[in-house]
Amino acid sequence: MTLDPTANAWPIPPSQVTLAVEGWNAGDLRSRELFERSLRSLRGQSYPVTGCEVLILLNSGEAEAGVGWLQDLWPGAKAISVPGMTYYRAKNAALRSARREFIALADSDVVYEPNWLASLLAGFTPGVDLVVGNTRFAPGFLSRTLNLCDWPGARPESGYTDWFYGNNLALRRSLFSTIHFREDMGGSGGGSVNVLRRELASQGVRFWFCAEARASHYLAPFLIKRLRVGAYHVRHRQLSPTPPWSWAIRIPLAGPALATGGTLVKAWGRAWMFRRSLPGHGLTLAVYLATLSFVKAVEALGAVAYASAPGWVNRRFGWFDVPQVRGAHGPATDHLDNPAT
């Protein structure tokens, strides 16, 4: 793609775009360095972000105290205070606050390639209201295997997909003004996007995957992250009856393992779909199937632990409590409310 640096050359001009960056992930990781790295990658876009409305979502205490380094790094960005901020409370605050026709959602623990925003916005064609980009983990332990686990919207090339995620996403106002993410599924909100995805798909909304909108996600320490992911296999199925294998969660011990096994089958399917891009042009497929099984075995431990002792898991690993604030949203229902929350 050849990109023209002049603002009026873009099919979607900056005057129609809101760029929203959540600050929850960097706060959870206690890393200003990650936050700064993400913001610098966004400021360095080939797309003229200086003409966009830029929102940075911060926990209410941080926003009220003022963040000098943030103002220095991105003059003109608007800090949005989010009481009791969680990951999806930040996303919902962005959807409510955006004043332009398109919104791009970015995360504070992700680094975006220079052509990311231009490529993401180029995915909007007639009939496309949601575009998801191509997120991958930064290189590290089992990162290629984990890409097959955690980014199910990905395809070998651009095209319609059946999944999206909140760290690399753009929406048209006709869609984002009528939706919200559930806020009752934990601090990081694992499962919230799954509920919204199914709801939108049932309404006939199609999701476009843009392979060129590349981003590199921070690779968290393996063990704790996979145990937490396994716990979320149980948590969001307890709160929402529609995901596959939700019925099995009620079966002691076996149910959580079955639910995790279902995600393993899907991961194997993605490995098969991407087999030609794996090292050795598919000759390493068996290795990836084995390492996917290992990852899911660890997640199964987290799922069984949460189903057996949710209080202990929450105290030990966090992520699952949702801070109570007056007026917080997140009803235990699979149906979308309007207006957005």
Image: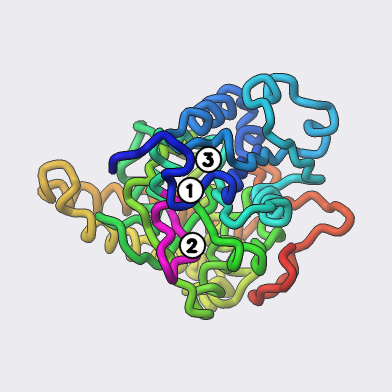
Counting every numbered tag in the picture gives: 3
Question: Which tag, 3 or 2, sits closer to the chain's start?
Answer: 2
List the residue tagged with mark 2. Answer: 130
Q: Would you say residue 168 is visible in this rendering?
A: yes
**In front of the other: label 1 or label 3?**
1
**In front of the other: label 3 or label 2?**
2
Residue found farthest to the right: 326
In the rendered image, the quadrant that contains the C terminus is: bottom right
The foreground one among 299 and 87 is 87
Image: 249 above or below 203: above
Image: 68 above or below 255: above
Q: Position of residue 194 (x, y in %)?
A: 53, 65
**Element class at badge 3:** helix
List the residue tagged with mark 1. Answer: 168
Question: Which tag, 2 or 1, sits closer to the chain's start?
Answer: 2
Answer whether labels 2 and 1 touch (C-beta < 8 Å): no
Q: Position of residue 26 (x, y in %)?
A: 61, 33
Please provide the residue range marked out in magenta.
120-132
Q: Place residue 306 in its image quadrant.
A: bottom right
Answer whether labels 1 and 3 touch (C-beta < 8 Å): no
In magenta stretch: residue 131: yes
List the residue tagged with mark 3. Answer: 224
In magenta stretch: residue 33: no
Q: Place residue 65 in its image quadrant.
A: top right
Q: Position of residue 266 (x, y in %)?
A: 34, 64
**Element class at badge 2:** strand
**In the rendered structure, which amino acid carries the disc numbered 1?**
Asn
Give me the residue at 61% from left, 26% from top.
31
Left or right of residue 154: residue 62: right
Q: Residues within 10 Å of mark 1 (few under 14, many from 20)?
A: many
Q: Residues within 10 Å of mark 3 (few under 14, many from 20)?
A: some
**In the rendered structure, which amino acid carries the disc numbered 2?**
Leu
